[in-house]
Image: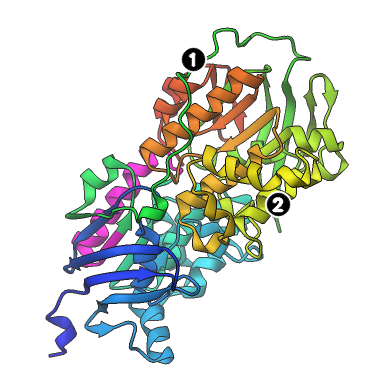
Amino acid sequence: MDSSDTMPPVTVTDLEIRLPGGPTLLNTTSLTLQAGKIAALTGPSGSGKTTLLRALIGDLPHGAQVTTGTVRILGQDVFTLSPAALRALRRHRIAYVGQDPGSALNPRMTAAQLIGELATKPSPHAVTALMKECRLPEALAHHRPGALSGGQQRRVALARSLARQPDILLLDEPTAGLHADLRDEIVDLLCGLATDRGISIILACHDPHVVDTCADTVTTLSSPAISAASPTPLREVVHSPTADTTGTITDGLSATELRVAFTHRSHTHQALDSVSFHAPVGTATGITGPSGSGKTTLLRTLAGLQKPHSGIITWHGDPLSAHIRKRSREQQRGIQLIPQNPLGALNPTRTIGASLTRPLRLHKIVSASHMPSRVHQLLQDVGLPADFADRYPHQLSGGQRQRASIARALATEPDLLLCDEVTSALDPSTAAAILELLTHLRTERRLTLVLVSHELDLLTAYADSVHVLDQGRMSESGGLERINEPSV
């Protein structure tokens, strides 16, 4: 009998990872996982959850080193395997789905092609079965990643990983950005994979409900000292009682009869169908709805990154061009999008400091001599240490990248902020601090917010009004009970 069949599939012993001469990325950690069990990794942003998951497949951040400890996967020490053996392990026995799965999907391939590419059984019937298992409507089979929502991209990535029939499944925030009903369905799926197929699952997660529901064991990671910063403390936040939620149609942001459709060959998906809404100056307008309902498409359209087939967008009564490059410099400065995937806003070849400096210089926010101090202030505002200015995006955790993306959007001192699931990658305390910061800016500068989120508690606490988007159609303000309907 193969000795790997008699020992735990995953054993991590006293593992510590750090950058030479730099910060510790993962404090000393041990973990053992049996077959058919689910282990949850919890801890604040920057505690090393993603670093540990990547270590399990022998993939360390650039320049990082294992200072102590070992990682054994299916009886093999991953850090002593030959390149060929490591590739075989990753291809056939262990699957990893990152926190930003959309960035790993080939934008030219359809969902069905992406899943079939890795499937041990690539038949159309098998691909359809995998899509159904991961709660993906069959109609999405012909859609490319750009026509999928963030939640749908996440489920395509999960289906790709299951197509290989792995023994071990590693998931980084698998339910981030998902509506509660869909989140629970994915949790049930994971429990079934562990119980019925004997797959060992390790998931990094900050959602207490998910952890309590499915985890057999929980490992809580502690933050290295370098990541212990907190967002700038603010004076008591008062939800602005003067916010005018009934402003005239020429006040603030207005969208009228927006229509967006994605077509691939003979298949057309109506992402937005005659969507209209109004966000008065100084208010927070919430948008919610099931995964795939068009929330991200709406924000990208408002930001000038997705051209609508028809419809009108105005800001203070002035028409906004459908393409961001045709908008005035002042409109580009004043309207900023924080995407659900922070890698879409951070250039991987630039340090975080350089990414923050660029909008400061482009829009002449501060003089050159004051730029370094302004960069440090922006980092402090979102709870990142000043020396993170010298780091690259790949050297940050998912939550830290999300905060850096928020800082970049705030660098232009915007008047309108379009926020796409900006707290989905953050632990609860950091998420609350970020939202308090945005509320503070509303009070101080009459910043207008459009918040896309599946978290009802967040919208109830921070939004003046809420719209429900479902199958590309927008409801009137309110109607929160509708979002409890089954999602697609």
Describe the element under mark 2 as helix, strand or loop. Answer: strand
The region drawn magenta spans 177-202
Quarter of the figure with residue 204: bottom left
Residue 46 visible here: no
Identify the residue position indicated by label 1 in the image.
238
Which is nearer the eye, 314 or 351?
351
434 in relation to 127, above or below: above
Identify the residue position indicated by label 2 in the image.
263
Q: Earlier in the sequence, mark 1 or mark 2?
A: 1
Residue 121 visible here: yes
Describe the element under mark 1 as helix, strand or loop. Answer: loop
Q: Quadrant of the N terminus?
A: bottom left
Left or right: 480 in relation to 277: left
Hey, which residue is sitting farthest front in the picture? 369
Instruction: Please check the rendered image and state whether residue 219 is part of the magenta-colored stretch, yes or no.
Output: no
Residue at the image point whose x is 21% and y is 83% from the top: 75
**Gap between marks 1 and 2 measured at Cα:** 45 Å
